[in-house]
Structures are given as C-alpha cells and as structure tokens.
Image: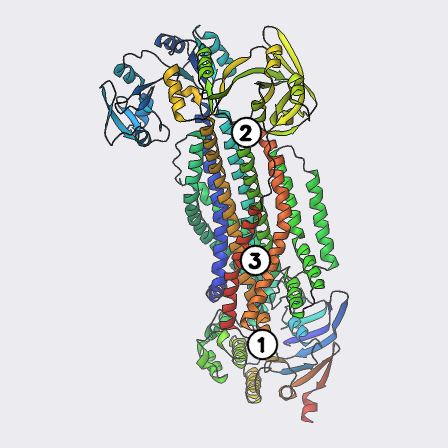
Amino acid sequence: MKQLLLIFQVQCAEYKQNRLLNIGFILSLAIATSTLLSILILNHASKLQYQQANSQLESPVAQYIVPKRGNSVSIKDFARLRKQGFNELQGVLSFRKKLKNNNTVYFKAIDLLPLSIAKPEVYHPTSILLSNTYAKTLKLAVTSKLQLIDQQTLIVKRIESKLWHNVALLDIAYAWQLFPEYTGFSYLIVSEMTEKRLKHLNQSLPENLILQQSFNIKERSGFADALHLNLTALALLGFIVSAFIAYQGANQAWHKRVELMSQLRLLGVALVDIKLALMFEALFLIIISSILGVILAFLMVSFLLPLLGFTLSQLYQLQSSGHFEWNWLYLLWSGIISSLAVFFALFRQFKLINTKKVSLFSKQSRVNLTHTKFIKKLLFFVALTSVVFFIIPEFNWHSIMLKYGVLLIITTALLPLFLYFIFSALNKFISRYKVNFILQDLKNQISIRFLPLAAFYIALTTSIAAALMVSSFESAFIKYLDQHLDEDLYIRFKIGEKEKIEQWLSKNNKVDEFLLYHDAKALVDKDTVTVNTVNSKRQLSSIVFKSQLTQSLEQVLKNGCFINEQLALKRNILLADKISLSQSTSISRTFTCTVSGIYFDYGNPSFEVTIAQKLAKAHLSGLKEIGFGVYFKSFDEKIVADLIEQLNIDESQLYQPSQIKKMALNVFKETFLLTQGIAVVLLSIACFGLFLSANNLELARKSDLFILISLGYSKSALFIHMLIQWLLLACGCILLSWPIATILADVLVSKVLPSSFGWSMPLLLETSSFISSSIIGLICLIPALTIVLSKINLKGRL
Amino acid sequence: MMLEVKNLSHSVDDGTHGREILSDINLKLERGKSLALMGDSGSGKTSLLNLICALEPIQYGDIYLSNVNIKTLSDKKASLIRKNDLGIIFQQFNLLTGLNVKDNIAFSAKLASKFDQKYIEQLTKALAIDHLLNKFPVTLSGGEIQRVAIARALAAKPKLLLADEPTGNLDIKNSDSVVDLLADLAKTYNTALLIVTHSQQVAKKMDSIYRLVDGKLSLVNSPEIKLG
C-alpha cells in the first residue's frame, strides 16, 4: 500500500510536470468519447424518433374514401362503416369561406376531442384554431376574431403550429353547429391496414364511395431511410476515427511513462505494483474522460439534436421536441468507449514495460520502413486483408460498407510506405541540400507519426466521400426534380369531374398544353408494378434516363417500354430485354414489351413501368385516369384561385410541382445538413488529434530540434523546417485520400444506395468537396507548431 | 559474500548476428570493500552493472547477491533486492523529474522503509546539496544532479552500492570529495561499493581494480599490489 501511494505521488507529479501533454491526452480521450457518444445518442434518439415517426407516417392517411359524385360523404355512410368495425376511419370536412377583407379562408374540421385531451393548452373543441403564419397570409390584424363576408363573426384562438400552418382548424361537430349548410364529410381518411382488411373495406363501401390511395408517404420513408443509413454509417466511421485518436493520445501521453516506470523498477518497485498503479490511473482516466465526454457530448447533442428534430419534422411533419433526454445507457456507453481506448493503450504500455530487461530510456517506436522484415509483415497484412476484401460478398449495404471499410484499412496500412516512397522520389529530384535534409529527416519520422496521420487520413477520406455523396445527390436530385416536376400544375379529379376540368382547360387561353395521366397495376414476374403512360414528347423529356437504347421515339412508342431503376435492379433486367406485364382481372392478360430505357426514380421504393398511352389502352385493363398535368403560358396563383372558384373543386386536388420541388429540396437540404455537420465534426476532431500529435511529437524530439538551433538554425528556419515536414505529410495523406474517397463515394452512390433503397445516382466529382475538407486539416497545423516552437525557445536545452 | 559473479557470459544481438560482450566473468566483493571496474568505452562495463542489478536477464553463468542467485528470481523478488539491498547511481542519473530534490532523495528510503530524516540531512550537507532541496531536477546543473543521485542511492543505506561513472560530470575537487564520501560511507555502513570509472584517480581509492578488455575481466590491482 505504501509503495502504491509512493507511485501515485510520482504519477501526480508527472501530471503536474507535463500538463499540456496530459491534459491534451485527457481532452483527446474525452473528445473522442464524446464524438462517438454523441453519434450514438443521435442514432439512438433518431431510432426512437423514427419508430414514433414511422408509426405516425403510416397511420394517419394510408387511403382516402371519396365520394364518386358530389362533394360529400354522408354521416349515415360513415356511421354504417364504423358499425361494421372499421375504426380506422376518420371524417374530414374541408370548406372555404370568403372573409370581409376579400381573402378566402380554408377550414378543416376533424375530430378534435382526442387532441384537446392530449394537449388542452393548444386544442379546444369549441374554438377555431388559426396559426399565426396563416393569419398573416390572410392579412388579419392581431385580433381574436374572424369576420366573414356575410357578417358572421367567429372567435379564433391563435396557435403556433407548423402542422396546421395553412388552414383554420376546428372540431367537426363545432363546424356543423357553426355552419349548418354542411351536414357530412368531404372525405374519410383511412389508417394503415392489412391488404385483406382493405379489400374487405373496399367491398363494404356503399355505391357512391370509392377508395383512393394516398400520395407521397412512401417516398418520404425513402428519405428517412437515407438519413438513418447516413447516421449509422457515420457512427461506424466515428468509431474508427475516435478510437484512433484516443489510442494515439494514450500512446503519446504514456510513451514517456515507460522511462518513469523503468526508473521505478530500478529503485526496486515490483512490476506488479507498477501495473496496479497504472490500472488505477487508467480507471481514474476512464472516470474523468467519461464525465468530460458526457458533458461534451451533451453540448454537441444539444446543437445537433434540434437539427435531427427539424429534419424529422420536415420529413414527417412530425413535431419533434429535439431536446436531449438523459438515458443512463449513455454513461455506460461512454465508460465502454473510454475503457476500450485506455485499456488498449494500457496493454501496449504493459507490453513495453513487461520485459525482463529494464530499459532506462523510452524509445520511440520507430520502424525502419525499408527493412525487409517490416515490408514482409506489411505485405502479409495487406495480402490477408485483401483476401478478406475480395471474399466479403456484397449482399446488403452492411456487407458493402464492411467490405469497403476493409479497403480503407488496407490503404491506411499502406499509408507510411506510400509516404516513404513519394518522399524518396522527391528526394531524388531535388538537389538542394537543405530540402533534401528536410525530406531525409521526414522519412525517418514517418513511422512515429503514423497514428495521427492515419486518423487524419481516415477522417479526411470519409469526409470527402460524404461531401461527394451529398453533392452528387444534390445535383442529381435537382436535375431529376427539374425534369420530373416540370408541369406548372397537376390536377387530380374525382369521378364526374374530368369533363368539366378538361373543358375549362381547353377553353382557357393561358393553357399551353395539358396531358391526361393514367395508371394501372400489373405484375412483372411476382412484383407488382405501377404502369404509367406517356403520350407526348414533353412527358418523355421529363424522364431522367440512366441508360437507354438509341431508338426513335416512334419505335419506342410502338412496342418499347421504360422501367425504373428499382425494377431493373430487383429483376436484373437489362436494356433490350423483354418483360411481360401480366394482369389477372376478370380476363387474364399479358403484354410483352422491350425495355428501351431505364430511368432514375430517387426515393421511390415501388416498381414502375412506363409505356405509350396507346399501348396501355390496347393491352391493359384497369387503366385509371388519375389527373391532368398542365403547362401554362404564364402561371400565377390567380389561376389556382380561378380554378377553385369556377370549377368548385377542393384545394387538396391541386398540386403545384414548383412547390413540391421547393419542399423536396428543403427536405433534402435538412436531411443531409446533419450528415455534413457530423462529417465536419469528425474531421475537426481528427484535426485536433493532429494538432495534439504535432505538438507532442515535436516536443518529444525537442533535443534533436535544439541541436539544429545550436548548429545555426534560426527560430524561423526551424519553424519552417517543422511546418514543411508536417505539411508534406498532410499533403501525402491528402494525395492518397482523394482517389480512395472517390472510390468510397462511388461505392456509396452506386452500390450502397441501390442495395439499401433500390435506387442509385450518378457520381459527381466536385472540386470544392475535395479542397474544402483538405484545407481544414492543413490550417490546424500552424498553431500546433507555434506552441512547440515557443516551448523550445523558452526551455530549450541540450 | 555480498556479490559473487560466476562464469558470466553475455551476448547482444546487433540485428545481423550476436556479439559476445562479456566472456566468462568471475568476480567477488565482500561487504565493507570497494572495487573499481575500468575499461574502454563499449567494453561491457555498464552491461555487467545492469546484470548485477537484475535489470537484464542473465544468459550464461550466475550472479549471487547476499548468497542468493538472482538468475532465477521473479521480478517481485528481484525488485525486493534492488529496493532493500542495492543503491544504484547511473550515468544518466535517472532522477524522477516530477519530484523535487527532497522527495527524490526520500523516495527510495521510504520505499525500503528505511527513511531516516537525520541521516538524509547529514547526507545532503556532506554532498553540499542541502540548499537545493525544494528545487526540481530540470533546474539543476549536471554536477548538482549527480550529487542528488548519489544522495538518493545512499539514503536507503544499501548493502551494495553500484555507481556507473559517478564523477563523470564533476570537477576534480568535487570528484575527490564525492569519492571519499562514498568510500567512507561504504566503510561506515559496511556497504560493498562497485564503481565503474575511467579515472585512475578514482580507481586508486578503491580496494581493488579490475579491467574489462574485449569482454574479459582481469584483476589489475589488488591491495597488495597497490601497497607494494
């Protein structure tokens, strides 16, 4: 015990003596812990929120029940269906009224009772709820009254809600009471139900009602999956980078400790006591860095979680709180992460001191990179990991990520050799002695600087790959939206409305062109596909092809068809293959066509086939007319108002592709903001690791550097010497990271995305993605080297 | 017998092949006696010292400390001998940089449970380092560090004192007084003293002088020869 206390005294003295080194170590450990912890917390929080969101995503509106004719579903029909046990149904009444200020207000009436019980501070069954945003749109003064043109005055309650931002919300019973002219529902919404039950519902519907599928939901789930995959992938990368940094921190801080421990052994302290003391120190470090890690993670998560919440609210219109909720599991994770890093470094320390021979000097683990033994070992490792790389199958996105993670490890192992050879080559081309000396000295330093360089290389490579993926996604997505949503207006019609809308469109001189959209369901082998139709060049030009046959439009329209990438990948269909569309309605039908093109269909989890309208009409049954796509000569909001006014149709039947495009791009930006944020955090931490290492490693060879000063190097010359060496090393890492990042980004867009979602996108190599990530790494070296130089000036001695 | 080295041989691996640096060494040293070990640089003096301190594993032959063969000792038992019986002054001084002079000197005495405040005060006065007690090793000169290392080695009243070039950083006057002090203390406390040195002056003050040449040890001066 007395011995242990004496060793503790020496250890404490060591912490006092090398403050920067040890605080840096604890900090790097805490930061590594917190990075990984915050990614885990985000992943955990997102998982919980996804579960909640997915249930909300799937439950509210899976299908609509709309009237075949007229504008309302009667209370009697609703009651009959509920009596049959269809409790998934809810009635919605939507209508509009003219205000005294000539603006039109849209009302939506639903059953508010459950919401008023859950959130009485917001919802009330006998108030009209109006969001501040909507009040502003309606040009209403700050008042609690809504004055209609017919002099009726309604009491409103102002609310802050993104969900109800463009309607005046009220309880359905209250709506019937206030506006007796409405006696039923505009439509019924149906929650998610099994296919069997849905079929039963369809059969139970009265003659005048029809089931209609809801839009957009599944496409949104594609985005959500993409976000979740990003977070999981980043958690894995975060683990690798953090582990490297923590290990490197521990390794460096404890490097000098070998010398101290040898001195203690020399004075008669037994190895077992030294190990025990080191274990206690490790425990102390784990506790300190876990607590610090949790605090740092809390700060980081407080910043990142609202981003996640915002992303989810964009994806699902889900009101996510986005605040940090403590879970005791987090402390456990934190402890595990710090323990792994500390004990891993500690075991190396044990290995170093656990020798019969007591070395009185700590030796830097300098490896001769040209030594045959080292090269043999390295090549053996590379050969072994290459075999692993080639044998890992690419059957799902996890295995693909694992496979290319192995590639990253192989290149990391080859990094010192790569650096050695490029600097040797540079050495041969440069004849100036001073530069040659810098390179020669640098080559000798590569092995001891390997760990920080490896962490920097991994973080940089993944950060560039993430940036490339995001920029590729952005450019591909914008192009896709521009082509896909190029109409000015899309009008969905109910039964009986087609003719009057068509007539209005034909007569309106502002309309440039309008197209009638059809769709049908069919089977390709066992997969259900949606068959879309085209009947104009404009429609064809809206398709973004991944690959297509060089055929004339006439030929394609005669017997060709286009399929989306999802179907091509699932069924392994290539261009010029023939596919059979079969339908088993009253008469069994099969139509065979040649695949003339495969098109991108980002975010859509279902399969699609597009054929000429004529072919569809001739060979397929159950072809439904679903709506009109309209191109105007000049489009403005007044056209929408005229349409609603003159044709008496509901606003929910009109879609403005430009708005959908804007919303989709917003969702996209928010989705990947988090990914980019975390990638930047990871890179910054790797740079912090590089900063600490530059500082520690240069301090460790202070005596060598001081010799240079004694031989006539000025302070500025020494600074340039160190800076050039680190810059060259960082540049070497950058040089290797660029091609590897390109490979990884290509794998992400061309293999991981299709494997997880069934769709891919073309890779866009944007220079800014390479440059911005690389520059951050270089900038952090300057302050690190300045600290070292100032230390050499103050305390330098031979 | 405090120290007995029997047929000791030792080789080092220089990367390509083994090189024998100590060959069939035999040596005896009793308590209260002193011995100087001389030899050219690289002749194996420090390696022999390391082997005696059980800092390196013995390859061939045996070393006995207080009649205990250290070849087969576990690390714990070897540490116990170093702690209780040996005082070591090495070329590189090996002071604990985090501790001040006072704590450095007290460290090994406390470790061996032989801390004696009065004795340490005498020691520091005799070595003229009593004014440096609160200073840290990084602020001391080479000579001061060496004297602190000597004080630390003597603080635990070892049975065998091993010193590797203890006067290497000292001027002649200081060197003489330090060696005299070491020799006196060895006599007073019945301590065996083994000094590795290049200095004839230092060697002459010891009871016997051995020389290592090409790994072979030979007695070059015994008390009888010296007296004669």
Dot 1 alpha-carbon crowd within 10 angstroms: few under 14, some 14 to 19, many 20 or more: few
Q: In the rendered structure, which amino acid carries the disc numbered 2?
A: Gln
Q: Nearer the viewer, mark 2 or mark 1?
A: 2
Q: Residue at x 49, y 14 (%)?
A: A198
Give the secondary structure at mark 1. Answer: helix
Provide the residue designation for mark 3: A251
- Residue A212 in picture, x, y percent from top left: 47, 15
Q: Nearer the viewer, mark 3 or mark 1?
A: 1
Give the mark, 3 or 2, whose residue is nearer the N terminus: 3
Please name which of the two marks, 3 or 2, marks the residue nearer to the observer: 2
Residue under numbered circle 1: A710
Q: Is residue A8 visible?
A: no
Q: Is residue A723 visible?
A: yes
Pick whichever of labels 3 and 1 is earlier in the sequence.
Answer: 3
| Residue type of the residue flagged with mark 1 | Ser
Vertical placement of A170 versus B209: above or below?
above
**Do marks 3 and 2 share a chain?**
yes
How many angstroms separate mark 3 from mark 2 (CA)? 55 Å
Q: Which mark is residue B155?
A: none
Q: Nearer the viewer, residue B136 or A283?
A: B136
Secondary structure of residue under mark 2: helix
Q: Is residue A390 above or below residue B42?
A: above
The tag earlier along the polypeptide, 2 or 1, is: 2
Q: Residues within 10 Å of mark 2 (few under 14, many from 20)?
A: some
> What's the chain of the residue with tag 1?
A
Disc 3, SS = helix
Q: Measure how far apart labels 2 and 1 are at the Cα level.
A: 69 Å
Residue occupying image coordinates x 62% and y 23%: A563
**Closer to the camera, A227 or B119?**
A227
Q: For mark 2, what is the residue?
A: A483
- State which chain disc 3 sits on: A
Find residue B9 and report its horizontal and vertical position in percent: 74, 71
